[in-house]
């Protein structure tokens, strides 16, 4: 099966081309949605076959490169269209195609009746293809094509409802902010390529060749510059401080798009890239520290914003930003396996949460439409009591919420707790470890609070829509609930493959699986980083228990505020109106960016238009025209058409010539 790895991105590409060219003529939603879903599912089947074949190989042989065709050969530069299959890319293709298939299936029901149905599925297939190209790329140029492809597709899908100004603005915002990050990625690529080539004659962008030559890279110095540039690219794609503000606005796209972006594809690209280049990043301890600090800061900062949002999708959006912060925290402390593990478990429960929110919105929109109500179907203040009308959506949403809160027995607990432990015990950052652990633990408390706030406001209490609307509330169809049930199952049990050694009930299959991928990075860490202090199992058990207690505290606070004493939030906001406004308005970061960057750019553009283009450029062009017109206006009088005028001119000319020779 390894030889057929090229089929994985090919299938969704064929689906995108088919629906893009023929979908408008077919006009049959079952055919359009079926083709798109079948294509990504075929990629999933091939991915399963490749995974099974890799499992059957010895650990040291689980690396396979497939050159599909020669691409760019120029001087020392060589870049083929090549795919790299190893345990890391195998996990990623399983997540992208598996979760992606469920989102495609869900979309058939959710997008029913949309005018651009064919266009949506063409974009969705193209998005999956781009992400698969990114994670399978055998060199950095192939990865960058996928990197840019997911950026383009995010623009197309976020702006799917292009007739809405807010959707168009959100799409442009995502596109521009990602271009900022992409510039950093390219600078990092050029720096690494130039340094290895000019100093050691290793002119390569191939991942396996860079890994083989990584021993030539210095400790810090140019590696720090290159990795910081790569991290700028990661902050753009994976929505970290300061390039995170595009992701919440991406909610303007259809809900399944949000699930695909937030769970299986685009935002995981930065985490994957750092994991793929771990053998380079681990040689730049300053960069590792920056990654850890930015990840921890993003985790808690986004979590605070999520506590005050009322749009169900925006709460989940800030939850994604926060959870990505946990992944970057893991990468920054050298816990690469833990970061990828959380990427996988997060894909399960976050896809379920977004699709569950879509099921709620679908039902609310239907009920409000039949009652001729213009209330917002995404505002949680209009919901309540939906667990009775939508039991499947409620149960799957609840188990996914428990998972993201980090309650033992659910997938999120295993991955989140491993990150917190590594943040505390890693040998990279010394005294900073306690700060990193504490920040992550507080962010986890906020996560438990705002996620259960969402559950309580949406599914518990009294339904806050009109009685006429309530009569039309019902569970979503099977095409929507089947993906929810599958993802809900994975949200519960998907973490058992990575059970920590401390629990000892099962081997940590996930860690063993990825061990060959990160062995080089771990070897460099042992060489360059002083060994950390030895921590007892008792301390690890204690911190694990404390993290659970912290999560339970967050849940308890949400229960008190929104179930036991629902009047408290109103009193709190009345007592601290400035604080509530600041959190509700996302700490005014968008306004700050407008003041610092957007408005000055607009002012500069206006000056270049009105002050330079109109006055200088147009002035020069118009001035030349006016001078020519003025001269021609004077000269045109010489061409009167009268013979006696011409005779007089000739006589005067003769007189002038004679006078010149007489009086010179």
Image (tube, rainbow, N blue to C red):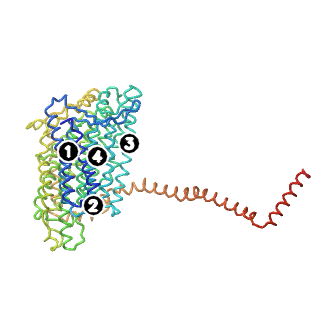
Determine which of the numbered discs, if any, sits on residue 184 in the image: 3
Foreground disc of the pair 2, 3: 2
Which numbered circle lies on residue 43? 1
- Asked whether disc 2 touches disc 4, contact meaning CB atoms under 8 Å apart, the reply is no
Find residue 61 and report its horizontal and vertical position in percent. 19, 29
Q: Residues within 10 Å of mark 4 (few under 14, many from 20)?
A: many
Q: CA distance from mark 2 to mark 4?
A: 21 Å
**Circles 2, 1 touching at the beta carbon (< 8 Å):** no
- Specify which label sits upstream in the sequence, 2 or 1: 1
Mark 2: secondary structure: loop
Name the residue: 11% across, 65% down: 389
Circles 4, 1 touching at the beta carbon (< 8 Å): no
Q: Is residue 83 left or right of residue 176?
A: left
Name the residue carrying label 2. Answer: 116
Quarter of the image where one finds residue 306: bottom left
Instruction: State the SS at label 1.
Output: helix
Mark toward the start of the polypeptide (4 vs 1): 1
Label 3 element class:
helix
Q: Nearer the viewer, mark 2 or mark 4?
A: 2
> What residue is drawn where x is 28% and y is 48%?
266
Looking at marks 1 and 3 on the same chain, the residue that comes earlier in the sequence is marked by: 1
């Amino acid at each position: 099966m390894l030889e057929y790895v090229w089929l994985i991105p090919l299938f969704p590409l064929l689906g995108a081309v088919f629906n893009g060219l023929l979908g408008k003529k077919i006009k049959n939603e079952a055919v359009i949605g079926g083709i798109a879903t079948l294509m990504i599912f075929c990629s999933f089947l091939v991915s399963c076959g490749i995974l099974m074949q890799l499992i059957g190989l010895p650990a040291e042989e689980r690396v396979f490169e497939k050159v599909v065709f020669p691409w760019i050969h120029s001087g020392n530069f060589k870049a083929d269209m090549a795919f790299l299959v190893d345990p890391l890319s195998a996990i990623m293709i399983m997540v992208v195609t598996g979760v992606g298939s469920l989102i495609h299936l869900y979309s058939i029901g959710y997008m029913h009746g949309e005018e651009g149905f064919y266009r949506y599925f063409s974009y969705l297939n193209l998005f999956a293809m781009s992400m698969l190209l990114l994670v399978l790329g055998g060199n950095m140029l192939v990865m960058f094509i996928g990197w840019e492809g997911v950026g383009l597709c995010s623009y197309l899908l976020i702006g799917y409802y292009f007739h809405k100004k807010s959707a168009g603005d959100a799409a442009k915002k995502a596109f521009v902010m990602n271009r900022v990050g992409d510039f950093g990625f390219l600078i990092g690529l050029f720096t690494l390529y130039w340094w290895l080539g000019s100093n050691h004659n290793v002119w390569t962008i191939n991942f396996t060749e860079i890994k083989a030559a990584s021993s030539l890279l210095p400790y810090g110095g140019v590696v720090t510059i290159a990795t910081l540039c790569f991290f700028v690219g990661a902050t753009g794609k994976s929505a970290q401080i300061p390039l995170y503000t595009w992701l919440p606005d991406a909610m303007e796209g259809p809900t399944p798009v949000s699930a695909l972006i937030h769970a299986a594809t685009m935002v995981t690209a930065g985490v994957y890239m750092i994991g793929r280049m771990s053998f380079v990043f681990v040689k730049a301890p300053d960069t590792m520290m920056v990654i850890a600090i930015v990840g921890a800061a993003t985790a808690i900062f986004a979590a605070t914003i999520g506590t005050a949002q009322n749009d169900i999708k925006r709460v989940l959006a800030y939850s994604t930003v926060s959870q990505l912060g946990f992944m970057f925290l893991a990468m920054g402390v050298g816990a690469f396996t833990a970061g990828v593990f959380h990427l996988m478990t997060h894909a399960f429960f976050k896809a379920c949460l977004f699709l569950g929110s879509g099921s709620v919105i679908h039902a609310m929109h239907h009920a409000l439409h039949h009652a001729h109500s213009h209330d917002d179907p995404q505002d949680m203040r209009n919901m309540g009591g939906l667990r009775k009308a939508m039991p499947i959506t409620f149960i799957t949403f609840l188990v996914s919420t428990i998972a993201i809160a980090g309650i033992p027995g659910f997938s999120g607990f295993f991955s989140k707790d491993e990150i917190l432990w590594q943040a505390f015990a890693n040998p990279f950052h010394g005294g900073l470890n306690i700060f990193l652990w504490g920040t992550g633990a507080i962010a986890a408390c906020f996560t438990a609070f705002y996620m259960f706030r969402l559950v309580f406001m949406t599914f518990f209490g009294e339904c806050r829509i009109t009685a006429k609307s309530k009569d039309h509330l019902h569970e979503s169809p099977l095409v929507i609930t089947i993906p929810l049930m599958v993802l809900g199952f994975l949200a519960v049990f998907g973490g058992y493959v990575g059970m920590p050694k401390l629990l000892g009930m099962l081997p940590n299959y996930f860690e063993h699986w990825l061990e060959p991928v990160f062995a080089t990075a771990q070897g460099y860490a042992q060489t360059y980083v002083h060994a950390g202090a030895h921590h007892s199992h008792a301390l690890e058990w204690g911190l694990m228990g404390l993290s659970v207690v912290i999560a339970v505290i967050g849940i308890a606070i949400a229960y008190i505020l929104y179930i036991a004493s629902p009047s408290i939030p109103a009193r709190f906001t009345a007592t601290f109106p400035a604080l509530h406004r600041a959190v509700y308005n996302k700490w005014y970061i968008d306004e700050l960016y407008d003041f610092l960057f957007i408005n000055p750019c607009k002012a500069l553009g206006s000056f270049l238009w009105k002050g330079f283009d109109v006055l200088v450029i147009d002035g020069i062009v118009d001035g030349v025209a006016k001078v020519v017109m003025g001269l021609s206006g004077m000269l045109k009088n010489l061409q009167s058409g009268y013979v006696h005028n011409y005779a007089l001119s000739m006589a005067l000319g003769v007189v002038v010539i004679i006078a010149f020779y007489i009086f010179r």
